[in-house]
């Protein structure tokens, strides 16, 4: 990979293992971390906006902010787990390099959520069935999380991590925390609001 410019979305989705190699220099590290964080924020915000569109624009904006907060909180909460599981699996990466690996995973998730957001938005503005929107949101989010395992596999193939078992355990923990917060902060309020109206 050309180390003179920050990798783009295409490189992230096509060759996540190569993206990890960009984080060698200090200047490159912060540029890459900022890019990955931006992709994560935009993707989660779009997905949250699509969910909230089921109600109105005000709720859509609020849900967009909630989804970004959920992703950030889940990452910070689960980072110690990432470090411990990766170290147990034989990884010699520093905490900073592991943070980039985690951000590659969350940016992949953000990219997939952004790609699926138009589908969710279309159903959100065209149906009044809250149960359908909740199920569809959970299904699309789960579908996105399945593909987040790819950067971990790519890192193992590149020799960036020695063993992927511990990282997969982290991914399960992260996915569970992210999904639990999303259900509690975004989806459940819509269901309760609809119940109160009926």
Image (cartoon, rainbow, N blue to C red):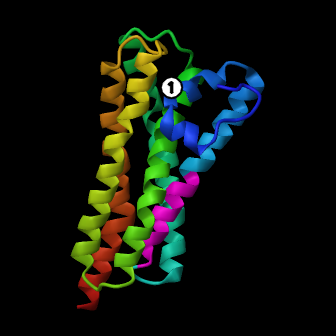
Q: Residues within 10 Å of mark 1 (few under 14, many from 20)?
A: many
Q: Quarter holding the C terminus?
A: bottom left
In the figure, 79 relative to 62: above or below?
Answer: above
Residue 124: % across, % down: 37, 78
- Residue beneath the point at 29% across and 86% down: 128
In the figure, 99 relative to 157: above or below?
Answer: below
Task: Using residue 179 as the reference point, say whether residue 101 is left or right of it.
Answer: right
Residue 88: % across, % down: 36, 12
Residue 3: image quadrant is: top right
- Residue beneath the point at 30% across and 36% down: 172
Q: Secondary structure at mark 1?
A: helix
Task: Work out whether residue 153 or residue 75 is closer to the camera in this orientation and state it.
Answer: 153
Residue 35: % across, % down: 65, 42
Which residue is the site of mark 1? 17
Q: What secondary structure is the magenta-colored segment mainly?
A: helix
In the figure, 51 relative to 170: above or below?
Answer: below
Residue 51 appears in the rendering = no
The magenta span reads: 41-53
Residue 163: image quadrant is: top left
Q: Quarter holding the N terminus?
A: top right
Residue 87 appears in the rendering = yes
């Amino acid at each position: 990979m050309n180390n003179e410019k920050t990798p783009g979305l295409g490189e992230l989705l096509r060759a996540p293992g190569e993206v990890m190699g960009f984080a060698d220099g200090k200047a490159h590290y912060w540029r890459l971390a900022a890019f990955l964080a931006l992709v994560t924020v935009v993707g989660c915000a779009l997905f949250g906006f699509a969910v909230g569109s089921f109600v109105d624009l005000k709720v859509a904006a609020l849900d967009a902010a909630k989804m970004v907060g959920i992703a950030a909180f889940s990452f910070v909460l689960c980072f110690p787990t990432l470090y411990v599981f990766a170290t147990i699996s034989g990884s010699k990466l520093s905490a900073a390099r592991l943070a980039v690996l985690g951000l590659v995973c969350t940016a992949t998730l953000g990219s997939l959520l952004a790609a699926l957001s138009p589908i969710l938005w279309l159903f959100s503005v065209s149906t009044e069935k809250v149960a359908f929107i909740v199920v569809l949101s959970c299904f699309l989010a789960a579908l996105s999380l399945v593909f987040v395992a790819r950067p971990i596999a790519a890192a193992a193939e590149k020799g960036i991590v020695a063993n992927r078992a511990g990282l997969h355990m982290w991914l399960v923990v992260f996915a569970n925390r992210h999904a639990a917060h999303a259900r509690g902060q975004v989806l459940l309020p819509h269901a309760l609001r609809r119940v109160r109206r009926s």
